[in-house]
Image (spheres, coloured by chain):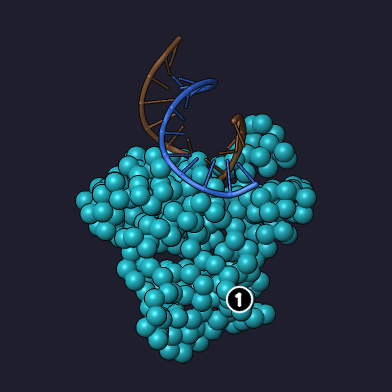
Chain colours: A cyan, B brown, C blue
Amino acid sequence: MNYEINGNTIKIYGANGFCADKTFDCGQCFRFEKSEDGAWEGIAFSHLISVKEDGDTITLSLLDGAPADERLISYLALDRDYESFDRDILSCTQGDETMKRAIETGKGIRIMRQEPFETLISFIVSQNNNIPRIKKIIARLCAAFGEEIHDRRGELVGYSFPTAKALLSAGGERIRECGTGFRDKYIYDAARAVECGEIDLYALREKSTEEAIAALMKIKGVGPKVAACVALFSLDCPDAFPIDVWVKRVMGKYYKEDFDYHSFGDYAGLAQQYLFYYERFLGGEG
DNA sequence: TGCCAGGAAGCCG
DNA sequence: CGGCTTCATGGC
């Protein structure tokens, strides 16, 4: 992989099979949509970002005109060697035909390195909810409490994800008006814990997976599944293994009752994502 | 209509 | 600890 930066654009050559469709559509992020010209557009780091795939070349552009930097490469995990991760999973699961098929099907998925606070709030919203509605609620939270983002012509193109401070000063009542239902108090408590320094999300990137998950679960409304999602999708914990209804389904279908996900190895979270994609989008028939 | 959605808290035995 | 109920909301 190498790259070149030119103003608000960064081109990455030799991205080793990165697949934008799978990466943005596999349920790990809720703010990217495919535009008419085939590029994926979404907001991260308070910038409107476009991700265009052209063979083995990936073009990342900041459509709001901000200068591009390496942070975007890290955001999409384009600097990681996924072939070696896949080999590691396969060596841990020798002869596992289901995992082989899941990897083959999900090839090109990258576990993103999203912003921890956005990931935390997003997966609190996700509990007992479905993906289309999760996206709607998050979009409303951003429009209500985020900052406006404009393209180079000055047109409003979206909103940044709200800060903890913004959610805190909004209050539970106005959070609820975004359609969060009973999760309003959880979102508020998470914002409070972050804003008052009770939890330092970025510091958790330096901790072990177990420590990070334990710290996250101190927040009201954050259980094992949400904590594992935050750890996996934003805190550099590739062994975090979120267990949701889809994974339960695929595990119940292909694995024994007493199966321990730790046997998937150091990249169990990537294995989980392959299984999720395999079951959810292809019903395990791919 | 009832059921489910990338769950977790509260309560009960 | 393990199991059950409840929690808003919308789409089907």
- What percent of the width, then of the height, locates residue A143? 37, 63
Question: Which of the two residues, A108 or A204, is positioned nearer the viewer here?
Answer: A108
What amino acid does circle 1 point to? Glu
Left or right side of A55 for A238: left
Which residue appears at 63% of the width and 63% of the height?
A: A22
Subunit of label 1: A
Left or right side of A25 for A62: left
- What percent of the width, then of the height, locates residue C8? 42, 39
Whether residue A137 can be seen here: yes
- What percent of the width, then of the height, locates residue A129? 51, 44
Which residue appears at 39% of the width and 39% of the height?
A: A182
Q: Quadrant of residue A186?
A: top left
Which residue appears at 21% of the width and 51% of the height?
A: A196
Question: Which of the two residues, A207 or B4, is positioned nearer the viewer here?
Answer: B4
A72 relative to A254, above or below? below
Left or right side of A41 for A94: right
Quadrant of the rendering where the N terminus of chain A is positioned:
bottom right
A248 relative to A270, above or below? above
Give the residue number, with chain letter if any, for mark 1.
Answer: A36
Question: Which of the two residues, A147 or A201, is positioned nearer the viewer here?
Answer: A147
A187 relative to A81, above or below? above
Local secondary structure at mark 1? loop
